[in-house]
Image (spheres, rainbow, N blue to C red):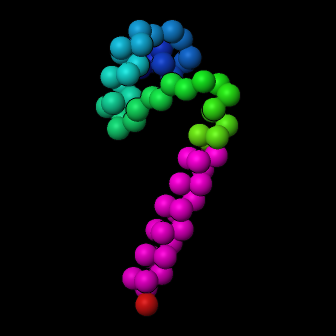
Amino acid sequence: MLSKLKNGKGVNLEHALRVLAGLGLTMLVVPKAHAPWLEQAAFHAAKIDEDAAREQHAWREE
């Protein structure tokens, strides 16, 4: 099943969700029109996390 997922082949949704859960991930289903907003929000959140990690690293070096 993992090979099928890696190669873009069809798998049972239940199995795909189990793989996501095993990787510590989740799937969010939203209307297509909302996807760009959520992608932008996720990018912003990741940047905030990255900036915070950088600040923490700099603080430890002082």
Nearer-the-camera pick, 9 or 17? 17
Location of the C terminus (image quadrant): bottom left
Identified at 44% across, 76% down, the residue is 57
Q: Is residue 46 magenta?
A: yes
Coordinates of residue 27 in the picture (x, y in percent): 45, 29
Pinpoint residue 42: horizontal percent, then vertical percent: 56, 47
Report the front residue among 36 and 25: 36
Looking at the rendered image, the quarter that the N terminus falls into is top left
Q: Nearer the viewer, residue 48 or 50?
A: 48
Instruction: From the top left corner, tell me how far across and down residue 30 is, in percent.
Output: 55, 26
Q: Nearer the viewer, residue 39 or 9?
A: 39
Up the image or down, 33 lies above or below 13; here it is below
Q: Residue at x 54, y 11 (%)?
A: 9
Task: Residue at 36% x, 35% y: name it.
Answer: 23
Q: Quadrant of residue 31?
A: top right
Within the magenta stretch, is there residue 57?
yes
Residue 48, compared with residue 30, is above or below; it is: below
Left or right placement of residue 54 versus residue 25 in this view: right
Q: Main secondary structure of the magenta part?
A: helix
Residue 41 position, x and y percent, is 59, 48
Residue drawn at x 56%, y 17% is 8
Furthest residue toward bottom: 62
The relative height of residue 58 versus residue 38 in the rendered view (above or below) is below
**Residue bounds of the magenta highlight:** 40-61
Q: Quadrant of residue 21?
A: top left
The number of numbered discs placed on residues in the rendered structure image is 0
Q: Along the horizontal axis of the image, is 14 left or right of 36? A: left
